[in-house]
Image (cartoon, grey):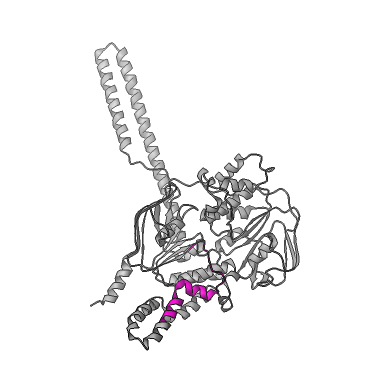
Amino acid sequence: MEVSYFEASILLKRSDSMLELKDVTKSFGGKVILSNISFTVDYGEKAGIIGSNGVGKSTLLKIIAGQLHQDSGEINTNALESIGYFKQEFEILEECQSVMTFIKGYIGIDKLEKKLNELQAELEEDESKIEEFCAVQEKYISLDGYNFDYKLDNILNGLGILPDVRNRKIKNLSGGQKSKIILAAVLLKGADLLLLDEPTNNLDIRSIEWLETYLRSVNIPCLIVSHDRRFLNAVTTKTFEINFFDRTLSSYPGNYAQYREFKEVEEKRQLELYEAQQEQKKELLDSVRQKKDWASKGRKQGVKDNDKYTRGYERDRSSGLASKAKKIEKQIEKLDKIERPRVKKKLKININFSRIKGSTLIYTKELICGYPNGFKTSPITLEVNFGEKVIIIGENGSGKSTFIKTLFSGLEKISGTMEIGTGINIGYISQDTKIDTDQNLEQFVMSSIDEEKLEDKSKVYTTLAQFNFTYEDRQKKYAMLSPGERTRALLAIFSLLDINALVFDEPTNHLDIEALESLEEVISSFDGTVIAISHDREFIGKVHPDKMYKMENGTLTKV
């Protein structure tokens, strides 16, 4: 059977690695971030990248995307013609443009359409333009331009960007809606490789589930940095872990759940081998010490004994024992050294619950939140009692963050009644943890705590260490910390204060899985009040909320 050139190229594309890294290393300020990273991603593979905050996951994606250059090593993209890159933190510079204008501009299809129309008109009078027309048309076809409107509608509908949103200006959208717009643009660009850095951050549950289905349905290879355990389990076919200690990368088959099972077995087996070897070494060393002791006693006995035959026997016996001891020592030296598994110290988030108990935390009656010339909620009547755990869900742009900002972050209400109970000490983390400051982490934490409450500055250092911040980390500019590190820093501040209410707007965004699991434990055991906006299905299940509410088009209803 003959195979056409086109079929052969497709077969080659599917069998060869689409992406290959060999010994990629990157350092910042003399500190190694990535060390000798090597892996391959094949056609259609979906690889999850996991690891603690700050180990270089986002840096790795930036290097592959060409936005950073590695210090050493090779990156082979082989058959890749284009890479789609969704950043963890993004910025849209021209927010006055509409959603559709932005998407078409991002992809570049608007310019191509304009050029095609111009050239087509010119062709009627100048046939020499045919070559240029064909070149532009080829680019247009590569973006599936003639089918673009259908693809656009499919992806925007999937992400919940409804027609009424598509003509809005970017500046009038919520943070979650902006994230969806960027993601849609990346997916529509038609890349041969997708680099997705925390793609589920700010996405509502419906959009996350659609994205899972979409990624499983396409044969585009993907590298996905994510803390969303259910998302990783649903999408990924292999797992890359960046080691906290040496910044090397290990590859594991299967999704996150399969990685956890394999990792537990691997660490248990490694520990068993280490302990078995230690026991073997102990027995051999005991034998060496015993033989040396016997040899020493024999030599002393031989010196005291007047019988020359006895002296000779003891001398020979001592010499033999010493020789055996040396052989055993050489045997110990030849043993393959089995390292004790290095396990990162488990992050333990400890938020000191205030002994001061508050009254009813929140009471609202006919409260309308929003913006005078923009989005407004329906009247909201709500009561949250002290000690309750409350989760608010809902699609992006439905008004969840607007409601929380009105209650806890100084956003002016439109109308209605709003009361916060007495004796309430709130720890609040918003979606955006960026703060314009020149302070380093240590200074930022110090300045966030009243001097009267901070009797011993060493307590700050101890607390930051408990939250896995090193001395070097403490000297970093707060603004230069990763989003996950900034969230951990705020949690560290809460642990130094008397907090009896926690308010989180998407608390799982940017946290690594270890920190996320620790936060789940804290919230589950916290005796105060917890109010959290979340789309993380695993997180919602783990915190066991007393009440759940859904915000839909500005209307809050109990689930």
Percent coordinates x, y for residue 130 in the rendering: 34, 83
| Residue displayed at 46% across by 71% down | 187
Quadrant for the C terminus in the image: bottom right
Q: Quadrant of residue 47?
A: bottom left
**362, above or below 244, in the image:** below
**460, above or below 146, in the image:** above
| Residue displayed at 42% across by 79% down | 115
| Residue displayed at 39% across by 34% down | 282
Span highlighted in magenta in the image:
87-116
Percent coordinates x, y for residue 89 in the rendering: 52, 61
| Residue displayed at 32% across by 16% down | 301
Percent coordinates x, y for residue 359 in the rendering: 75, 56
**89, above or below 127, in the image:** above
Residue 431 lies left or right of residue 225; in this view the side is right
Q: Is residue 121 magenta?
A: no
Residue 313 lies left or right of residue 554; in this view the side is left
Residue at the bottom extreme? Answer: 124
Q: Quadrant of residue 300?
A: top left
Q: Is residue 350 visible?
A: no
Quadrant for the N terminus in the image: bottom left
Residue at the front extreme? Answer: 125
Nearer to me, 139 or 15: 139
**493, above or below 378, in the image:** above
